[in-house]
């Protein structure tokens, strides 16, 4: 594997009631944990709906944190 983190956007989450949204997200996380047990810490699952603006802030924050880490790591490597 590349060792890079993965962001999974569970799209169309707005089609489900709130309790089903939470259970669906947990189910996706369990499926990834079962399929990729060594890399589960590198997978972030976000319930997402662009039309209802669900999960946009969480996705942006996750990506921003990863980019900040990558930028910091690259800076350290060049020093």
Image (spheres, rainbow, N blue to C red):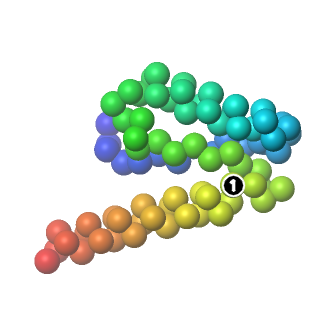
Horizontal and vertical percent position of residue 16: 83, 37
Instruction: Residue at the far front: name it.
Output: 19
Q: Quadrant of residue 72?
A: bottom left
How many badges with numbers are in the image?
1
In the displayed structure, 50 sits above or below 23; it is: below
Q: Residue at x 45, y 64 (%)?
A: 65
Kindly identify which residue carries mark 1. 55
Quadrant (top left, top right, bottom left, bottom right) of the N terminus:
top left
The quadrant in which residue 36 appears is top left
Q: Give percent across and percent down for residue 26.
A: 62, 33
Residue situated in front as seen by the camera: 25 or 49:
25
Identify the residue at image location x=42%, y=61%: 66
Label 1 Cα neighbours within 10 Å, binned few <14 / some 14-19 / many ≥20: some
Is 43 left or right of 21, judged from the image as shown? left
Check the image and name the residue furthest to the top: 34
Residue 6 placement (x, y as % from top left): 47, 45
Q: Secondary structure at mark 1?
A: loop
Q: Is residue 78 left or right of residue 39?
A: left
User: Residue at coordinates 45% horizontally, 23% vertically from top-left?
Assistant: 35
> Is 73 displayed left or right of 15 in the figure?
left
Q: Is residue 37 left or right of residue 45?
A: left
Task: List x then y, in percent, for residue 9.
Answer: 63, 45
Residue at screen point 32% across, 43% down: 2
Which residue is at the far bottom?
79
Q: Is residue 70 above or below residue 4?
A: below
């Amino acid at each position: 594997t590349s060792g890079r983190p993965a962001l999974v956007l569970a799209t169309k989450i707005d089609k489900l009631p709130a309790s089903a949204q939470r259970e669906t997200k947990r189910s996706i996380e369990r499926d990834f944990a079962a399929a990729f047990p060594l890399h589960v810490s590198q997978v972030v699952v976000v319930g997402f709906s662009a039309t209802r603006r669900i999960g946009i802030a969480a996705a942006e924050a996750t990506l921003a944190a990863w980019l900040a880490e990558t930028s910091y790591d690259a800076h350290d490597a060049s020093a």
